[in-house]
Amino acid sequence: MPIQSERLILRRWEDADRQPFAEMSSDPRVMEYLSPLTPRSACDAWIDRQLAHLAAHGFCFWAVESKGDGAFVGAVGLLRVSYDAPFTPAVEVGWRIARTFWGLGYAPEAAAAAIRFGFDALQLPEIVAFTVPGSRKSRRVMAKLRMLHDASGDFDHPRIPEGYPLRHQVLYRLTRDRGLSVAAPSGA
Ligand SMILES: CC(C)(COP(=O)(O)OP(=O)(O)OC[C@H]1O[C@@H](n2cnc3c(N)ncnc32)[C@H](O)[C@@H]1OP(=O)(O)O)[C@@H](O)C(=O)NCCC(=O)NCCS
């Protein structure tokens, strides 16, 4: 069953998403704080990893579609953190939205639906998020979700080599007890 919010559907990846996902992933402003996904085969491999994670765990970074016209909006969802860090084991919430749709509140809306799925269906006690300190837009999304910055948990990403600008990350947490402040989705 896809997850729904007021304006969006979070659903399993389809082959038709591969081209718009590759276009979004070639936008330097979308990728400013993300590991590069080039060439096109890396985009396809990224989607294949989401499908494998979905098959193994029942969740992933889903494809996000606009309810209004079916347009591909981006990728938002939950992933098990796949490396060891002081805050693991953990499930992270993450987002990337195609630039045409920035500023509409889509990332917090979709992330809230994903988090609700994590707390209700998966019964997760906590969901984390992380980004580089300078990623102001993402940190705004975390704040809109009522996530709290745990400065004591800021860390160096073990998969990013020393000296690379994306290595140092700020850690945000949201416990199920604290919950969400954003409006409930209309479906799912
Ligand atoms: C971060 C991101 C997901 C936000 O998505 P969104 O749907 O635009 O989220 P919002 O509409 O709630 O906007 C969040 C903040 O982004 C900034 N923002 C929104 N639209 C913007 C634009 N067109 N130009 C510059 N900044 C913008 C604003 O600071 C906004 O906060 P505000 O609502 O208090 O003004 C989106 O910018 C994105 O995909 N960025 C690239 C991918 C990325 O960095 N992912 C996270 C990696 S950890």
Image (cartoon, grey):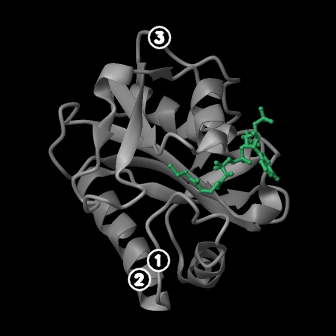
Query: Where is mark 1, residue-wise?
Result: 37
Give me the residue at 50% from left, 39% from top: 133
Query: Where is mark 3, residue-wise?
Result: 178
Label 3 element class: loop
User: Given the image, on which type of amino acid does mark 1 rest?
Assistant: Leu
Front residue of 152/120: it is 152
The answer, for residue 101, to whether it is visible in the render is: yes
Badge number at residue 172: none
User: Given the image, on which type of amino acid does mark 3 rest?
Assistant: Arg
**Which mark lies nearer to you, 3 or 2?**
2
* Ligand 1 has an atom within 8 Å of the beta carbon of the residue at disc 3: no
Q: Quadrant of residue 186?
A: top right
Give me the residue at 31% from left, 59% from top: 163
The answer, for residue 125, to whether it is visible in the render is: no
Label 2 element class: helix
Give me the residue at 65% from left, 52% from top: 9
User: Given the image, on which type of amino acid does mark 2 rest?
Assistant: Ala
